[in-house]
């Protein structure tokens, strides 16, 4: 299994101090920062878009922005997110019937490509050619739309199935992940770990990041 990558979700941070919060996480051991982009269509909420990400990438040189695009038309934002400094563009398979050209467009703009599946989407929806083209697969462990939800154990068999099919691929879990659920995530085979509330809500975020990383790398 690939090495652990910890990607704190800034959705749980103080948006008024976004660049400082990102720097604090990198100092605390985070490799990536998870940026939840919501458009009010694919999910009911609206969070942030390219203008905010652009400020973060300028304010935090070298940051790896893991952009989780909870948007209805994923093809529409590839250029804007690339221009804003996005490093990885992860879109939902539920939002498109034609993922391969989107992956190509993402790569042509120099970003890594990820494909995400929501709790009700089976792992079989990730076709072999799509997975092969993508750099990362994201298995949601809550319904996309907001932070602080309860982890859904029933999503983990999909991680196990995808890890069996793709031994070397980055597989990300997102939603309700923290010290209480990381063992199950690691056992299932995920290596890219998103955590919002569990990291930003902790007295010792650095300690939580270290625990998550050590569990995956065990
Ligand atoms: C949910 C988002 C998640 C969320 C994770 O729609 O995609 O990234 O912020 O937050 P926690 O870790 O608090 O569940
Ligand atoms: Zn997310």
Image (cartoon, rainbow, N blue to C red):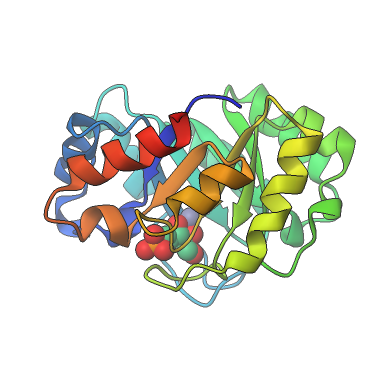
On screen, residue 52 versus residue 5, left or right, reads left
The C terminus is located in which quarter?
top left
Look at 54% across and 68% down and name the residue there. 142
Task: Establish if 144 lies above or below 17.
Answer: below
Q: Image quadrant of residue 170?
A: top right
Tell me if residue 50 can be seen.
Answer: no
Among the 4 quarters of the image, the one containing residue 146:
bottom left
Q: Does 57 sit left or right of 87 as displayed? A: left
Which residue is pictured at 37% across the width and 70% down the height?
A: 148
Measured as percent of width and height from the top left, residue 73 is found at 68, 57
Look at the picture and state if 61 lies above or below 188: above
- Quadrant of the rendering where the N terminus is positioned: top right
Q: Quadrant of ligand 1?
A: bottom left
Q: Is residue 66 left or right of residue 111?
A: left
Q: Residue at x 14, y 42 (%)?
A: 20
Name the spot of residue 60 as percent of width and height, x first: 23, 30
Of residues 87 and 212, the one drawn nearer to the viewer in this rendering: 212
Query: Is residue 214 visible from the viewing direction of this image?
Result: yes
Residue 202: where, in percent of width, then height? 18, 57
In this image, 133 relative to 23: left or right?
Answer: right
Give the mark count. 0
Residue 175 image point, x, y percent: 48, 61
Residue at position x 34%, y 59% in the image: 11
Q: Residue furthest bottom?
A: 44
């Amino acid at each position: 299994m690939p090495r652990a990558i910890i990607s704190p979700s800034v959705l749980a941070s103080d948006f008024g101090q976004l660049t400082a919060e990102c720097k604090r996480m990198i100092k605390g051991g985070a490799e990536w920062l998870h940026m939840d982009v919501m458009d009010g269509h694919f999910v009911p909420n609206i969070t942030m878009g390219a203008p905010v990400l652009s400020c973060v990438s300028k304010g935090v040189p070298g940051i790896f922005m893991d952009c989780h695009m909870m948007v209805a038309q994923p093809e529409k934002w590839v250029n804007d997110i690339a221009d804003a400094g996005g490093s990885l563009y992860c879109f939902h398979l539920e939002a498109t019937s034609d993922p391969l050209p989107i992956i190509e467009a993402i790569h042509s703009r120099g970003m890594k490509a990820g494909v995400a599946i929501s709790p009700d989407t089976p792992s079989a929806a990730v076709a072999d050619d799509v997975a092969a083209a993508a750099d990362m697969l994201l298995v949601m462990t809550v319904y996309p739309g907001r932070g602080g939800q309860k982890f859904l154990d029933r999503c983990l068999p999909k991680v196990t199935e995808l890890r069996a099919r793709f031994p070397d691929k980055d597989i990300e879990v997102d939603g309700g992940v923290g010290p209480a659920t990381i063992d199950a995530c690691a056992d299932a085979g995920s290596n890219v770990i998103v955590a919002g509330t569990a990291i930003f809500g902790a007295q010792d975020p650095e300690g939580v990041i270290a625990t998550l990383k050590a569990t995956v790398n065990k």
